[in-house]
Amino acid sequence: MRRIQMCLIAMMAAVAGSLATLAAQKPVQRSTTFEWAALEARPTQIGMRRTVMQAPTPTLDELEIHITTLNVGQVSHPPHQHPAEELLIVKEGTVETLQNGKATRLGPGSIIFHSSNDMHNIRNVGSIPATYHVIQWKTPATAPAPAPLALNHVAIAVPDLDEGIRYYTKALGLKEAFTFRDNRGSPLSYLQISRDTFLELQGATAERPAGLIHIGLEVADLRAAIPRFRAAGLTVRDPSTSARTGAVISQAEGLGGLRFELLEFGPDSLQRKVINDWKQ
């Protein structure tokens, strides 16, 4: 009897889980229309926003459409990037789009395409509010957006760096992503475990015996996160940009002296390029 009850409980849990999954799934958007007059304009700090839709379609994981109005002189956001690609169609006004450091002015009817992970933003450079449609989509090929906080690497000290590289690339089948032996810091090597995770090797010294050195965490917006980390009790140093990799790095210390390396990877950082070039 007890076995039957356990089986029934397991079946009920499975059904409940399936129902929860179905409830979380958004219905597929079929053909429809959106009347301009019916779209609610919500005020923002930089102008207005009209939300149109955000849902999967028969061929897209997600299609998101909204309409932004920028007041004179306002910027949509600081230059940023995201895995999803998007089209912007200028309805009225004059805008300046910044794409990977190149600025272009455009007027009504113009179309702007932002490719995956290219740095971009929009500025209203005209004399009237500028309005543009934003059409963004995600497909199975769209990489997931970086998590606010994610494990990037574990750094260990090994008796001999070259021997460590040979050992872990053979024993674990890891790929040597990059190695530094210059005078800008300690010799080190990054071995790639998966697309976003690495094993960092450094040579052991009298001050740095063999074993764990630190845990590396990728932070989406490091400078904005540091005050929050400090307020929660983490000891965090001010960030700096690595001369070797171009990543923004901050050293931190937690309970028991456990060391963390907090990192933010811009599009030109070596780590971001290696991650984007990953092929299993």
Image: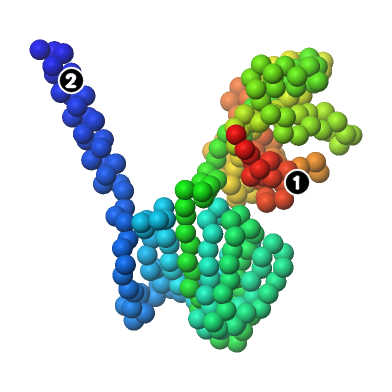
Q: Name the outermost residue toward the front.
A: 59
Q: What residue do we see at 82% from left, 28% from top? A: 187
Mark 2 near mark 1, Cβ–Cβ under 8 Å? no
Q: Is residue 53 left or right of residue 151?
A: left
- Disc 1 element: loop
The three-letter amino acid code for the residue at tag 1 is Gly
Q: What residue do we see at 29% from left, 41% from top? A: 21
Q: Is residue 159 left or right of residue 36?
A: right
Residue 39: x and y, percent?
35, 75
Q: Give the total number of marks visible in the rendering.
A: 2
Q: Quadrant of the N terminus?
A: top left
Residue 198's place in the image compared with 75, above or below, is above
Residue 128's place in the image compared with 89, above or below, is below
Q: Name the outermost residue toward the right.
A: 183
Residue nearest the observer in this picture, 147 or 58: 58
Residue 225: x and y, percent?
58, 46
- Disc 2 element: helix
What residue is shown with label 2? 7
Q: Residues within 10 Å of mark 1 (few under 14, many from 20)?
A: some
